Amino acid sequence: MILQDLHTHTTYCDGKNTPEEMVKAAIEKGLVRIGFSGHCYTFFDEKYCMSIPNVARYIAEINSLKLKYKGQIEILCGVEQDYYSNFSRIGFDYIIGSVHYLNIGDEYIPIDESKEILLDACNKYFGGDIYSLCEEYYSCVGNILAKTGADIIGHFDLISKFNEDGSLFDENEPRYIKAYTDAIDKLIPYDKPFEVNTGAISRGYRTHPYPSHSQLEYIAKCGGKVMLTGDTHAAENLCFEFDKWFEACKKIGITIE
Ligand SMILES: [Zn+2]
Ligand SMILES: [Zn+2]
């Protein structure tokens, strides 16, 4: 396994550490590569993302760290591009494409903030039918590469963040399975890796990375590939549980980048 983490956040968005603190921790942990993936600017929600002036500062700082730590670690300057962001992607080495919101009219509903927000949206816009909400989510996910031109598919089933106990929906419900297999079918031809994202484990929401085990099996069956990422918001969580999930992916027989 190449020890790298290409999904990391810093104080430029909602992370805890500065880019340099992250680089130092990465070197200490023996990473050969670290990629920064600050949240791109989203005009409809400025809470988590980099502000417009900060995007330019972020690119400049990461580029100067590339030079400073040359020979010790490879550093990449990426971005986590939200499905609904219309912000420029120029200046980035790579893009993670992620769906974080459902857009209904002029409302942008965050799907990873709380269970209550999801349930409210479900009642307000989907007639209380959670599978219809999931269908809307996966139809966006299926379009993520076409829409963002991303290199990596971010947290494929983020919609299940608050479903660890199965109380929101049944992940074996045929409508749910059809929604995600349709999305995977649309993404496979691009030959881009799906993240195996351990971020929700390190933050205590889940015990399994995104995507779910069944989804990983389906991706493997379709000949897709994956990349381990930490969605790391704090230096101590770089490459969180990568050994464990590397072995799990090997068992499933999926190609790991
Ligand atoms: Zn994300
Ligand atoms: Zn992220």
Image (spheres, rainbow, N blue to C red):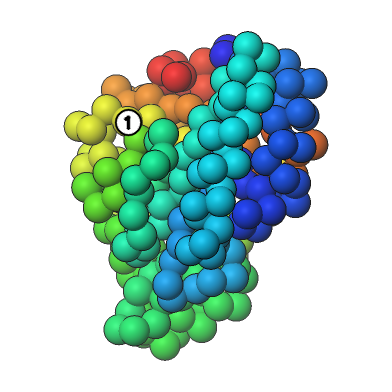
- Asked whether the viewer can see residue 165, the reply is no
Question: Disc 1 designates what residue?
Answer: 192
Amino acid of disc 1: Lys
Residue 161 found in image quarter: bottom right
79, 55: nearer the viewer: 55
Determine whether the beta carbon of the residue marked 1 sits less than 8 angstroms from the nearest atom of ligand 1. no
Q: Residue furthest bottom?
A: 124
Residue 181: x and y in percent read: 29, 44
- Residue at 33% of width from left, 70% of height from top? 132
- Residue at 55% of width from left, 78% of height from top? 117
Vertically, is 242 above or below 123?
above
The N terminus lies in quadrant? top right
- Asked whether the viewer can see residue 147, the reply is yes
The C terminus lies in quadrant? top left
Residue 5 found in image quarter: top right
- Residue at 42% of width from left, 72% of height from top? 43
Badge 1 local density, few (<14 within 10 Å), some, or many (20+)?
Answer: some
Residue 119: x and y in percent read: 52, 78
Label 1: state its secondary structure: loop
Residue 157: x and y in percent read: 46, 50
36, 152: nearer the viewer: 36
24, 116: nearer the viewer: 24
- Disc tally is 1
Vertically, is 81 above or below 2?
below
- Residue at 63% of width from left, 11% of height from top? 71
Vertically, is 41 above or below 144?
below
